[in-house]
Each structure stands twice: as C-alpha cells, then as structure tokens.
Amino acid sequence: MHQLFRLVLGQKDLSRAGDLFSLDDSEIEDSLTEALEQIKIISSSSDYQTNNNDQAVVEICITRITTAIRETESIEKHAKALVGLWDSCLEHNLRPFGKDEDTPHAKIASDIMSCILQNYNRPSVMALAIPIAVKFLHRGNKELCRNMSNYLSLAAITKADLLADHTEVIVKSILQGNTMLLRVLPAVYEKQPQPINRHLTELLALMSQLEQPEQYHLLRLLHVAAKKKQLEVVQKCIPFLIGHLKDSTHNDIILNILIEIASYEPVALNSFLPMLKEIGERFPYLIGQMARIYGAVGHVDELEYAG
C-alpha cells in the first residue's frame, strides 16, 4: 500500500487525508484493493458510528479511491474489494437518523454504489455486485433504494439473467412501493416468469397508483407474458386490459396485447366483444385494430358453427 494511504488509514490521520488528492491516480492504483480492505476494518469497528474523525478519514479515502478507479478504469481489478466493503455495510444500521441524515454506513454504501453499478455493462463486475445490490432494497433507506433501483434498471438492459435470480425480491420491493423497479420486470420475465405470475394480481392492482411511465412498464410486462402464451396469466389479464382500454393514454399498447392473445386464444375474448364494440364507438381510430380481434374471434365462431 502506498505510504500515504498507510499513514492516513493506519493512524486515521485526518490532517493528511487531503494530501491523497495530490498524488497521481497511476501512483496509487496498485494500493486501492488493500486500502479498501483497511477501510472495511475501520468501518466495522464498534465505535465507528460515533467516531467523527474515523468517518471523515473514510469518506475522504473512499472519494479518492473511487476517483482513481474511474480514471484508471480499473474497476474489474478492484471490484472484489469494493463490493466486499459495500456488502459489509449491510451488517450495520442503514435507516436514516432524522429526516434526511444518513447513518455512517449508509454514506459509505451510497458513495461506492455509483462506482460499482455504473459498470452495468461489465459482466464480471455485475456478477459480484447484483446479489449484494438487491439486499439493499429491503433495508429501510428510501434514498439508497431509489438510487439502487435506477442502476438495477440499467443492469436489466444488459444482464437480465443476473437479475432473474432475484425476481422474487424485486417483486416484493415493488409491492412495498418501490414501483420504479417495474421497468425491470419485462426483461426478467423472460427468464423467471413464475415469481411474477404468483404476484400478478397484486401487481395489476397497483395500476391506478402508478405514474404514466410505470403504467407503461406494467403493460409491457403483460405483452411479454401474452407472447409467452401463459394461459393462466392471460385469463387474469383480459378483464384488466379491457377495463383500461377506456384510458386513451395506453389503448394502443393494450389493443396490441389483446391482438396477441386473440391470435392463439380467441375464445378467451368472446364474452368481451360487446365492451370492445362500445369502446370502438367512443374511439373510432381504434376500429382497425379492433377489427383484427373481431376477425380472430369471429373466425372461431365460424369454425364452431361448421363443426
């Protein structure tokens, strides 16, 4: 470890901590893993939560380390130590003291979170980080949870398979109010539909409380489910979808889902034709899409009649 890191961390010397910023990134890069391990020891000590000097030293050192990791692009080399420190924060209280005052370990978790999770396009880093990241969703810190959800949504774009192992935890977090994570579900549904199917009724019940983008992600989830021809899911969805067709915001995507269902399970839509007709009269521009549903269902009627 670089001698200045050894001095600052070994003696918890706040007066010299700022000098770390005078060093070149390349000069300290080899020391970063060892420095992170030393920080983990300091932050795990019994008096850390009440020791302002140690907290200040740790805060400055983490800022210097994460800056150096970004500048030298050495995240893969130091990911294990960084995630190890992040994981150790889960052993401590993360709930805010007052209205906005983070605990010392919540500050550490927050400071290193972006350094880790902005590398959502690096599989080796995400393989280490995601199992730890999802644990923060249920630790009572809304700000940490919100920021974590943003990064997990990005991770879902490139590494949905890593998130899929934690689908149950993600769904429970959504049902507890963390609706930002709805955007993750269409991607993980492909890999792990069962936990989502189990909670589908509860997820659909959230619709009226959601912002418009979140409503769209929930409907995207239903479109993915419809394409997978999950009949049990489809039957739960149809009354919900028909009910929300009256909202012009989403009636285009809803009709696309219904057309998808009509292509392989037209009988399921039979009893809803009068409602569809009524909606078609209110929104004439939807007639073209509705005709495709009527065509599929009508075709079945003809087959039954012929039989």
Image: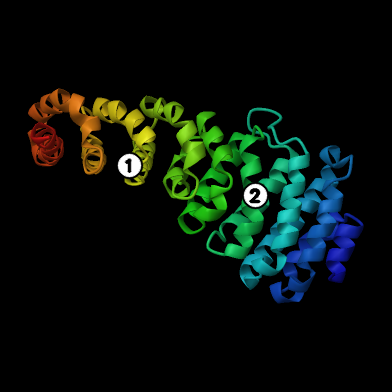
Q: Is residue 294 left or right of residue 238?
A: left
Q: Amino acid at mark 1?
A: Ala
Q: Residue 78, image x and y in percent? A: 71, 65
Indicate the quadrant where residue 170 lies.
Answer: top right
Residue positioned most to the front: 307
Quadrant assignment for the N terminus: bottom right
Q: Residue 35, image x and y in percent? A: 81, 62
Q: Amino acid at mark 2?
A: Pro
Rendered residue at 58%/63% (across/down): 123
Q: Secondary structure at mark 1?
A: helix
Q: Closer to us: mark 2 or mark 1? A: 1
Rendered residue at 60%/58% (across/down): 126
Q: Is residue 153 left or right of residue 81?
A: left
Q: Are marks 2 and 1 in contact (CB under 8 Å)?
A: no
3D distance between C-alphas at marks 2 and 1: 29 Å
Rendered residue at 87%/70% (across/down): 3
Rendered residue at 39%/30% (across/down): 210
Q: Residues within 10 Å of mark 1 (few under 14, many from 20)?
A: many
The residue that disc 2 covers is: 131
Indicate the quadrant where residue 124 lies.
Answer: bottom right
